[in-house]
Structure formats: structure tokens, C-alpha cells
Image (cartoon, helix red, strand yellow):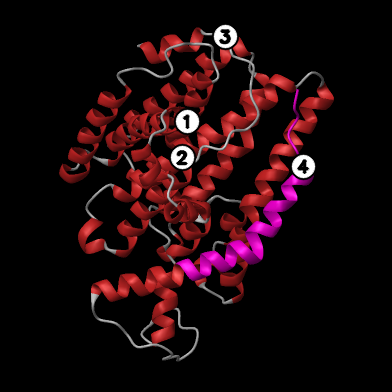
Amino acid sequence: MVLFMELISPLKKATPNKYYKYLDSFRFIAVMLVIFFHWLPEYFQDTGFGKLGVDMFFVLSGFLISQNLLLQKENIKSSINLFQSFKTFYIRRALRIFPIYYLVVFIFFFLSIPIITDNFIWFIFYLTNYLIIYNEQWLGMFSHLWSLAVEEQFYLFWPAVIFLVPLKYLGHALVGFISFSLIYILLNYYDNSFKIFSLQSCMSTLSMGGLLAFIKNTSSKTFSLRFDVPIFILLFIILMYGILKGFGVNLTQIINALFSFYFIKLLITRENKILDKIFANRITSFFGKISYGLYLYHNFIPWLLRNLNGSERLYVLEKWSIIPEFKNGILIFLSQFLLLVVIAILSWILVEKPLNNLKKNFRYLHG
């Protein structure tokens, strides 16, 4: 109840974008949950770790994107400013998201991988989540791209929500999006389980991040609640119980959203030596910075490794036997992770960082 009472508070004067040093490690935790889920199915396939990792990303994306948009909203004084803000947002997002995504899609298209060639339009227009829902089946090693499709669909309309809804109604609008999504989840609880991967369903997590950004930018004095830590611990216990015992993907998503909300809230409002060692160390922070590449490429690594050791049978590139075929699970995981890190680093240095640096030519408005 306190959470929603905060929505009626007026918005503070927005401040320039702030770098939250703990959130890179948060990204790394999220991506590792997904990797464990996909690479170690014998241990994690029956858990909700994969979905938890994705939902953590969604809440974080909703928070960071909404933070930037709220800053812009404060500085929009004319229709020209409004147009410029829309243009700046979409260009900056395109520079960050599109290059390596389309690089992957076109590489596999030219390799004539049937899943891509047969569904090329779905991949080009970021509709793979609805392709999965429509066919009621996964897309093999391309299945994880559903979450990138959801985020891109979210980016298309979210600036309009933040920019065009008056401030006095914006908090209520965010609660409305969350409520709509929760109703959709409940109505489809016993229906096609793949509907959980639709934008309608995922709005509960994405909008929760937006709600966190809105609350952070209000003048309310209750943002740093004394009960944050016990609430977080309670949600963590409930979440772990649900993951291990199986609450069902719909109920788990709701818990994931609340857990991620308070997790991020703690990381952006508290700072101490313990948190520094866990969330601000160089290793996890670095992996967090390249987390987009880690996530995008990770599902292709087992396939690539099988091609390198000559054991691939479905999508064979060449009859290679460059490296030995490992039988030990730990060696397989480590070799896959090493290969993933190398590819993600090369991707960051050669493609992502140079294009990301172009964003300096498209700066947000500042008052």
C-alpha cells in the first residue's frame, strides 16, 4: 500500500543520468541464471532460474529506460523538443541493440539454417516471441531471442507513455499497465503456457521497472524504506521456494517482478563495503558491461563447440575436429564459457563499443 501511495507525490526536478555502479553486476547475475538454465539442464531445467534471469533484465530495462525518459520529459518545452526526444531515444537504442542482433540473424541466414530462413520476417521484425506463441514450440538455439523481441516491442511505445501522459496521471498509468498485465496472466493461467512470453504478459515486469524509476524521481521521503531489507529477504525466500517446488511460470513471474523491484531498489539506494565487494568488483562489473553479448551469443556456443570438435549432427558447418570432444560436464561448461567470453569481448571491441560511442552525437536534452 505504501508503494502505491507514493505515486501521488509530485515529480522532483530530474537530475542528469547517473551511473549505478552495482547494476552491472546485477546484469551479470541475471545472464548467468539464464546460462545455467540452458547449459546445465540436468540441474536447472526443472527450475525457474532462466525465467528469473530474464525477468530481472526486464525490470532493470524498465527502470533504466524510464529514468532516461523521465529526464527528457522534464526538458520537453515544445513540439520540436518532443520530436527530438523521440528521435534521440530511438537512434540511441538502435545503435546499442540492432548491430549484433542483425549480425547474428544474417550470419545464420547466409548459413542457411532453416529456423532462420523459414521464419526470416519474424526475426527481422523482432517478433520471435509471437512466433513461439503461434507455433506453440521453441526455436531451438534461437529460442532465447524471444526476450529481445519483447524488449524491442516495449521500446517502440514506452517513450510515448512517458512523454505524453501528464505527470499527475503517469504513476496511475504505470499501475494500470502492471494491473492489465497481471489480469492477462491470470486469465491465461491455465491456457497456452507460451502466452507468458507475450508483451502483454511481460509488461508486469517491464512496467514494474518503470514504476521504480517514477517513485525514485518523486519527492516522497519513503523511497528508502527501513523495511526494504526484510521485504527483500522475505521475497527471496518465497522465490527460492517457488523455484524449487514449482509455483508455475505465471505466479513465479509475479514474484520475480517484486523480487527484482526490491533488489534493484536496494542496489541504487545503499552503498557499503560489503556491497562494493560483491557488486562493484572489476570482474562481475566487466561481465555486466558485456552482458548483452553474453546473452545474445550464449545459446549458440554449444552448437559452435560441437562443430569445432566434430560432434554436431544437425547444423553442420564443416567436418571439423579442431579441438577434442570433452565428456566431463565441468570441462564442457568451462570450455563453453571461455568461448562465449572470447566472442563477447571481440563483439564488444569490434562492433558494440565503436557504434555505442556514436551515441555521443545524439545527446538527450538537458535543462
For disc 3, the marked residue is 10
Which badge, 3 or 4, is on the more N-terminal residue?
Answer: 3
Numbered label attached to residue 58: 2
Q: Secondary structure at mark 1?
A: helix
Q: Give the number of the disc on residue 209.
A: 1
Q: Is residue 146 above or below residue 103?
A: above
Query: Is residue 325 left or right of 148 when viewed as pictured?
Result: left
Q: CA distance from mark 3 to mark 2?
A: 26 Å
- Where is residue 206? Give x, y as percent: 48, 34
Residue 261 sits inside the magenta stretch? no
Q: Earlier in the sequence, mark 3 or mark 2?
A: 3
Q: Return the x and y of residue 165 as percentages of the image width and height.
A: 63, 17
Foreground mark, 3 or 1? Answer: 3
Looking at the rendered structure, the secondary structure element under dot 2 is helix
Q: Is residue 37 above or below residue 339?
A: above
Per the model, the C-alpha gap separating discs 2 and 4 is: 25 Å
Query: Percent from the top left, x then y, of residue 312?
Result: 39, 82
Label 3 SS? loop
Residue 75 marker: none
User: Would residue 314 be visible to someone looking at this image?
Assistant: no
Whole-Å distance between the Cαs marked 3 and 4?
29 Å
Label 2 vs 4, first from the N-terminus: 2
